[in-house]
């Protein structure tokens, strides 16, 4: 198996890397010859008196775009067999699995962009595209540093403790278990007794259980992708039993009504219109069943403003005083551009990412969870929960992909299956949260 020996960084600002390459484990790896990092200013490959590397985009637009000539020439100057990576917000998310994969390459090249992006034809000359996350940076240099550090620490002999790379967060698909050091007691909080017991097997089991607990609470989407061992399943059952034994209160439960992305009758991805009935009726159902917030999801600004205007009519005007029950329900209403924004709002408010559960009249081959199973889970769930409903002809795949669970469809005694979303919300809330009779 190959091991990374050389990293080429193609950048217009090589001086940004000076301090970074001298410090900590990376500096030691470079000093003892385990790794070479070569900074290549691709301005040196530009033609003309001014060595220009960017130009205005065809078709107009703000900013400047990197020309293909200089960067492609720099890429072609690299040694044969170099894995060429373009750092761009349009790339696949960089994660621990990608770090492990890149660490097995003998040579790696990281292309740092600047300005408004790359000429599209540059993409034809790289092997893959990676993104550090869904945000915008001034250039790719900070992303390159993150990739370098994540990769280099995986190389043999770089870390003093050979077990460290396999025990840390994400290395095994879970967040890392809690860590403690001296003093044993700090401001009233003591190190867990298990960690000072000396029972190594029990300590190992405790750490695995806490890793599962922390991942379930903070990054449940990681747990959804985990292939659990028999021990993991037992530990998760113990976590559920602990929650039930403590009599923990029902988790926060929110509802989201998605107007985009949803499917049309012809299966196209569309945005549907917000209706007055959706605003009022689902808010009233949410208030009846103790829902904590009702999120209307639409990217259309005018539609969000409409929702806010309707809610304000009852919350700020005389109407609310005349019908206080309606105002009490409409105070639950929120508007967000995307389903991801609703998930992030819950995470910010609670400190924990929610369990996202989709509902659909047609599961389209995706695995589903039964009503009784989900109702029992809500009784012991420690995370907040977001119940997601789609308008139109159901949630599009990109919305379903954000959901950890898909609830089985509502089925009547006939073949007709075309309930309004308002009825579907009422049935769902009653089955999951209604009083036992």
Image: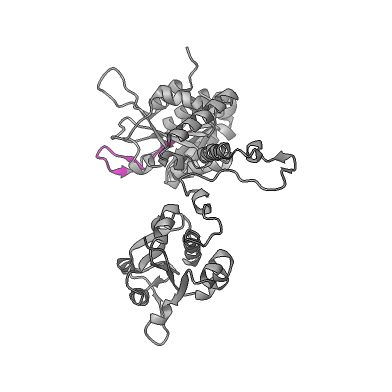
| Lateral position of residue 414 relative to residue 164, left or right | left
Q: Residue furthest bottom?
A: 49
For residue 89, say whether it is visible. no
Q: Nearer the viewer, residue 193 or 401?
A: 193
Q: Nearer the viewer, residue 367 or 434?
A: 367
| Lateral position of residue 93 relative to residue 59, left or right | right
* 255 part of magenta stretch: yes
Q: Residue at x 54, y 46 (%)?
A: 176
Q: Nearer the viewer, residue 198 or 80?
A: 198
Tell me which segment is drawn in magenta: 254-269
Residue 231 versus residue 154 in the image, above or below: above
For residue 58, say whether it is visible. yes
Where in the figure is residue 88, as x and y percent of width and height? 41, 62
Residue 9 versus residue 379 in the image, above or below: below
The quarter holding residue 205 reads: top right
| Lateral position of residue 329 relative to residue 262, left or right | right
Where in the figure is residue 381, as x and y percent of width and height? 51, 30
């Amino acid at each position: 198996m190959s091991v990374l020996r050389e990293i080429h960084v193609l950048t217009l600002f090589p001086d940004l890397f000076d301090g970074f390459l001298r410090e900590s484990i990376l500096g030691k790896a470079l000093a003892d010859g385990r790794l070479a990092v070569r900074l290549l200013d691709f301005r040196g490959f530009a033609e003309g008196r001014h060595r220009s590397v960017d130009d205005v985009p065809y078709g107009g637009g703000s900013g400047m775009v990197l020309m293909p000539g200089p960067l492609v020439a720099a890429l072609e100057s690299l040694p044969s067999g170099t894995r060429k990576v373009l750092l761009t917000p349009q790339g696949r998310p960089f994660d621990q699995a990608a770090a492990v994969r890149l660490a097995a390459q003998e040579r790696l090249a990281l292309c740092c962009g600047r300005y408004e992006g790359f000429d599209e034809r540059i993409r034809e000359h790289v092997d893959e595209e990676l993104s550090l996350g869904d945000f915008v940076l001034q250039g790719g240099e900070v992303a390159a540093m993150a990739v370098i550090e994540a990769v280099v620490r995986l190389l043999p002999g770089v870390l003093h403790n050979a077990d460290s790379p396999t025990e840390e967060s994400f290395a095994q698909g879970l967040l890392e278990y809690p860590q403690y050091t001296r003093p044993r007691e700090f401001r009233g909080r003591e190190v867990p007794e298990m960690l000072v017991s000396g029972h190594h097997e029990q300590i190992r089991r405790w750490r695995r259980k806490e890793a599962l607990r922390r991942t379930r609470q903070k990054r449940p989407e990681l747990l959804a992708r985990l292939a659990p061992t028999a021990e993991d399943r037992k530990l998760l059952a113990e976590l559920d039993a602990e929650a039930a034994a403590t009599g923990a209160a029902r988790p926060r439960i929110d509802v989201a009504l998605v107007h985009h992305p949803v499917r049309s009758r012809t299966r196209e991805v569309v945005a549907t219109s917000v209706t007055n009935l959706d605003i009022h009726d689902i808010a009233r159902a949410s208030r009846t069943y103790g829902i904590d917030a009702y999120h209307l999801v639409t990217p259309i600004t005018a539609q969000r403003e409409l929702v806010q205007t309707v809610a304000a009519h009852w919350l700020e005007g005389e109407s609310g005083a005349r019908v206080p029950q309606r105002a009490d329900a409409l105070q639950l209403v929120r508007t967000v551009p995307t389903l991801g924004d609703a998930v992030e709002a819950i995470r910010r408010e609670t400190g924990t990412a929610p369990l996202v559960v989709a509902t659909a009249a047609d599961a389209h081959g995706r695995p589903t969870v039964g009503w009784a199973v989900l109702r029992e889970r809500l009784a012991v769930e420690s995370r907040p929960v977001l119940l997601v409903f789609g308008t139109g002809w159901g949630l599009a795949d990109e919305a379903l992909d954000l959901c950890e669970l898909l609830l089985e469809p509502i089925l009547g005694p006939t073949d007709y299956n075309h309930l309004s979303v308002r009825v579907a919300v009422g049935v769902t809330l009653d089955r999951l949260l209604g009083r036992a009779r």
